[in-house]
Image (cartoon, rainbow, N blue to C red):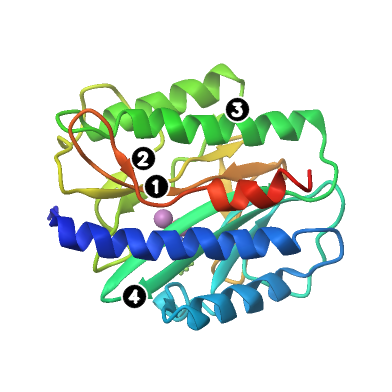
Amino acid sequence: MLVYKSEKEIEIIQRNNQLVSRTLAEVAKMIQPGVTTLELDKRAEEFIRDNGAVPGFLGYGGYPNTLCTSVNDQIVHGIPSNYELKDGDIVSVDCGTYLEGYYGDTAYTFPVGEISDEIKTLLKVTKESLFKGIENAIEGKRIGDIGYAVQLHAEKAGFSVVREMVGHGLGKNMHEAPEVPNYGRRGRGVTIKKGLVLCIEPMINMGSKYIKQDNDGWTIRTIDGKPSAHYELAVAVNKGQAEILSTFEYIEEITKNKI
Ligand code: MF3
Ligand code: CO
Ligand code: CO
């Protein structure tokens, strides 16, 4: 069932995603060799609570933390730990909030110190592929148009698209219909209409598209151990152009001064 949101509901979802975006900027300030992913998690939880919201992931399906921190070959759902980030790593930080009865959900992949040119390209192409997807999240298009645009951009660069995990609707639940795959065919899938709020979140691998899950029941990794990148934004569908409810601006204000 597709849930169409009113302007008022979209405003609340936007407040959530703005808070997630500002939380990710707090995390950005801490990203450097030696910091543990659990330290990032603690700061994110504190910042979310200080702003009157509740971490959206904590307890969701039994998930133990505020952030998903997925390092290098970890694609998504990495559990924060005492692992110290090191020079050359990349880390996807995915964060959610719950405020006024609705969810926020946004993710960004950070470089740690100096990363290789090949991995820089992976990050750049993955972020670009997200925006190609967003260009297609407009009234009258189909879900397959989003996935097609993401996949085309990623594969043109020689990278591969994870199939098992997908974007989703966002609202009173963190995961609502429709599923938003990062691959697909133009003109296929449900028609997109104003009032839908979608999380578009390409997971793009340097090597094989195939994945495996750790024994912790959460962490998803590439089958070949090569790195993977992940960016996520929440958007509200409109005529002509999607309204992006989260933002990378606060994050990139911080990282431009560091990298
Ligand atoms: N944030 C993830 C997504 O983008 C879902 C995380 S679920 C959790 O859809 F339980 F791991 F938090
Ligand atoms: Co997410
Ligand atoms: Co999501």
Q: Nearer the viewer, residue 160 or 41?
A: 41
Q: Disc 1 residue type?
A: Val
As drawn, the residue found furthest toward the top would be 156
* Residues at marks 2 and 3 touching, judged by CB atoms closer than 8 Å: no
On the question of residue 259 being in view, the answer is yes
Q: What percent of the width, then of the height, locates residue 23?
A: 55, 65
Q: Secondary structure at mark 3?
A: loop
Q: Secondary structure at mark 4?
A: strand
Distance CA(mark 3)–CA(mark 1) = 17 Å
Q: Quadrant of residue 217?
A: bottom right
On the question of residue 109 being in view, the answer is no
Q: Tell me which numbered mark, 4 or 1, is placed earlier along the sequence.
A: 4
Mark 4 vs mark 2: in front: 4
Q: Which mark is residue 181?
A: 2
Q: What percent of the width, then of the height, locates residue 113?
A: 84, 48
Label 2 environment density (alpha carbons within 10 Å; few <14, some 14–19, many ≥20): many
Task: Classify residue 42 as left or right of residue 21.
Answer: right
Mark 4 vs mark 1: in front: 4
Q: Which mark is residue 159?
A: 3
Looking at the image, is 129 positioned above or below residue 13?
A: above
Q: Pointer 4: what residue?
A: 99
Mark 4 vs mark 3: in front: 4
User: Which residue lies at the image location 86% right of the left edge and 59% below the top edge?
Assistant: 33
Label 1 environment density (alpha carbons within 10 Å; few <14, some 14–19, many ≥20): some
Q: Disc 3 residue type?
A: Phe
Q: What percent of the width, then of the height, locates residue 162?
A: 50, 40
Q: Pointer 1: what residue?
A: 166
User: Which residue lies at the image location 13% right of the left edge and 53% below the top edge?
Assistant: 4
Q: Nearer the viewer, residue 64 or 31?
A: 31
